[in-house]
Image (tube, rainbow, N blue to C red):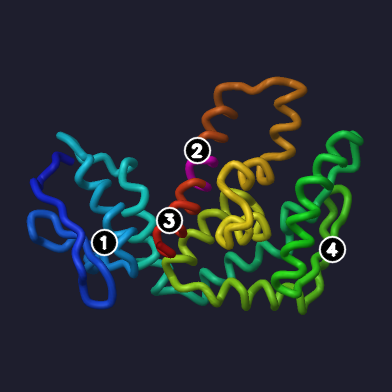
Amino acid sequence: MKRFYAAVAAHPAERGFGVSLDGKPLRTPAKAVLVVPTRALAEAIAAEWRDQSGEVKLDALPLTRLASTALDLVAQRQPAVVAEIARYAGTDLVCYRAEHPPELIERQHVLWQPLLDWATLRYDAPLLVTAGVLPVVQPPESLAAYAAAVAAYAPLELAALHLATAVCGSLVVALALIEGRLDTDAAFAAAELDQSFEIERWGEDAEQTQRRAALKEDIALAERFIGLLRS
């Protein structure tokens, strides 16, 4: 759609900070007034709209989209979103190790085991590790602990955690990102370890390059969103 506004401003609003376009409040797709808890996030959202020229491109509004998702969808069905995220602990990427070759086994141990050890101590929730693809049944008390940890997040944080968990295929990696244990590059390396290993051996095609770039962008968005929420 064409740019339909001239002035963009972030401003204090009830229960936080909002963004206005020509003095009118920015609204979510569900028509709710978009209000976020920190000025930093509101200013960043305003900058997305200010940077549009000619045509307003939705893919150039990632912070707006994620905030809208949190307000329109996550906040309205928070228990279901918590359950959806927490389910990843039952089949977490970092718990499923290769059976061969030795180089990959070693790389997984070096990169994934410290994350698993961190999560075990952070949430008092050990997870079992297995080799191969056959499922392992995780301790119920650990799954309950991860569910409780996820449930402690507010809707906007949950939206970022949901994004990171889904694209990484790992609640452990996503929690480490959200908690500041990992940055974007480290989270990407953990999530894409197996694929990166295969690419080193066999090369990368255009489709893989595009997929991996999109995945890294999503991880970076989740990290940036959380950072602005906590600024």
Q: Is residue 118 left or right of residue 151?
A: right
First along the sequence among labels 2 and 4:
4
Name the residue type under label 4: Leu
Q: Which mark is residue 128?
A: 4
151 in relation to 218, above or below: below
Please name which of the two marks, 2 or 3, marks the residue nearer to the observer.
Answer: 3
Disc 3 packing (10 Å; few <14; some 14–19; many ≥20) = many
Residue 18 placement (x, y as % from top left): 23, 65
For the stretch drawn in magenta, the main secondary structure is: helix
* Residue located beneath label 3 in the image: 225
Element class at badge 4: loop
Residue 218 magenta: yes
Q: Which mark is residue 214?
A: 2
Disc 4 packing (10 Å; few <14; some 14–19; many ≥20) = some
First along the sequence among labels 2 and 1:
1
Name the residue type under label 2: Ala
Disc 1 packing (10 Å; few <14; some 14–19; many ≥20) = some
First along the sequence among labels 2 and 3:
2
Element class at badge 1: loop
Instruction: Measure the alpha-carbon separation of dots 2 and 1.
Output: 24 Å
| Highlighted magenta segment, given as a residue range | 215-219
* Residue at x 10% of width, y 50% of height: 7
Instruction: Measure the alpha-carbon separation of dots 1 and 4.
Output: 41 Å
